[in-house]
Image (cartoon, rainbow, N blue to C red):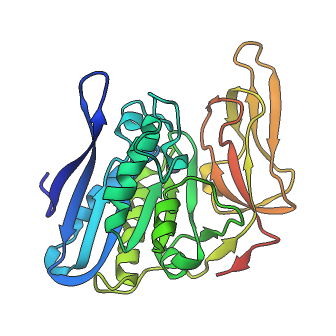
Amino acid sequence: MSLPTTYEQIPVTTLASGRELFIPLHRLEGRAPGPTLGLSAVVHGDEPLTNEVVRRVLSSIDPADLRGTILAVPVVNSLAFESLSRHTPIDMLDLNRNFPGSPSGWLSEQIAHVLTTRFVAQLDVHLDLHTGGIFPTVDYVYIFDRSRELSLAFGSTFLFEPSQPYQGTFAVPAGAKGIPFFTAEVGGGSFLDAHYLEHGVRGVMNVLKQLKMIDGEPIRPAQQTIVTEMAVVRPRFGGVLYPEIGLDQLGKEVAGGTLLGRVVSPYTFETLEEIRAPFARGYMILLRGAMMRVNPGDYGYMVANAETARPA
Ligand SMILES: [Zn+2]
């Protein structure tokens, strides 16, 4: 599949296997001047849908219609991708908690350092793409002061404005540089890939339109909601999760105490735990759409507090 991009591999290090570890980088240069937008995918190795979003975006843009440049890293953490794992298998670290990184740190920190100095350093705007992982399905974007208009333009129904952002994410080098950055969480779980691929591609194209890098107006839903309180509901016990609500409930309101799923022992078949919705009124932001194995402490569900939400 040929893309209208130039491609390079930024070296990171040599692995014990003798193989070279590199960061893959596509550059799509527009004919007219404009900003440089960074797109990154698969910083978590178990979120492969984001890779296809990047491929579709790059293959659908004619450089003649583009103002500025898109710099895209289609797989940020190739070692984690190889294992379909959130973490880097060699050092067991979450790359997305180790920015800005260090040239003399753990391997994940070394990768982060190369991304900070060789990728983010070139950008005017940065959008990092995520999903819910292999099993959960998710749909929201982060909204920060510097990213406000771009986050809204992405076109998700729910925007999350955290009071305390996670430390060490890809937001760190962008923050140090003072450029707009946000994360889009789209799909995962594979059940509705076609829907979420379309949503992800539309979201990136919306951002390009908002930045005036391509013609057109962003396509946004009639109503968008900013949530500030998000509960990550983690199973206390591992076993088989039997969902009690379906994927059609994603984005819908849920009453406090609603049974979301049951964790059952695959050994004795007894119910170990009933997982219930927090908050008197909540919005379902992440859920699990099928019977599956869960570990204690997994991202079981995410529910936003509807009482403290506001229209965007
Ligand atoms: Zn992720």
The total number of labels drawn is 0
- Which residue ends up furthest to the front in the rendered image? 104
Compare residues 157 and 175 and report the one nearer the observer: 175
Compare residues 21 and 257 and report the one nearer the observer: 21
Q: Is residue 166 above or below residue 33?
A: above
Q: Is residue 121 above or below residue 107?
A: below
Q: Position of residue 296 (x, y in %)?
A: 71, 30
Q: Position of residue 203 (x, y in %)?
A: 42, 69
**Residue in view at x 57 percent, y 54 percent:** 138
Q: Is residue 307 left or right of residue 116?
A: right
Q: Position of residue 311 (x, y in %)?
A: 69, 81
Question: Is residue 272 visible in this depiction of the protein?
Answer: yes
Classify residue 141 by image quadrant: bottom right
Q: Is residue 222 left or right of residue 14?
A: right
Q: Is residue 159 above or below residue 186?
A: below
**Residue in view at x 37 percent, y 48 percent:** 76
Q: Is residue 288 left or right of residue 153?
A: right
Q: Position of residue 1 (x, y in %)?
A: 14, 51
Compare residues 248 and 256 and report the one nearer the observer: 256
Task: Indicate the quadrant containing the C terminus: top left, top right, bottom left or bottom right.
Answer: bottom right
Question: Is residue 199 visible in this depiction of the protein?
Answer: no
**Residue in view at x 66 percent, y 37 percent:** 298
Q: Is residue 283 left or right of residue 70?
A: right
Classify residue 214 by image quadrant: bottom left
Compare residues 148 and 271 and report the one nearer the observer: 148
**Residue in view at x 30 percent, y 60 percent:** 72
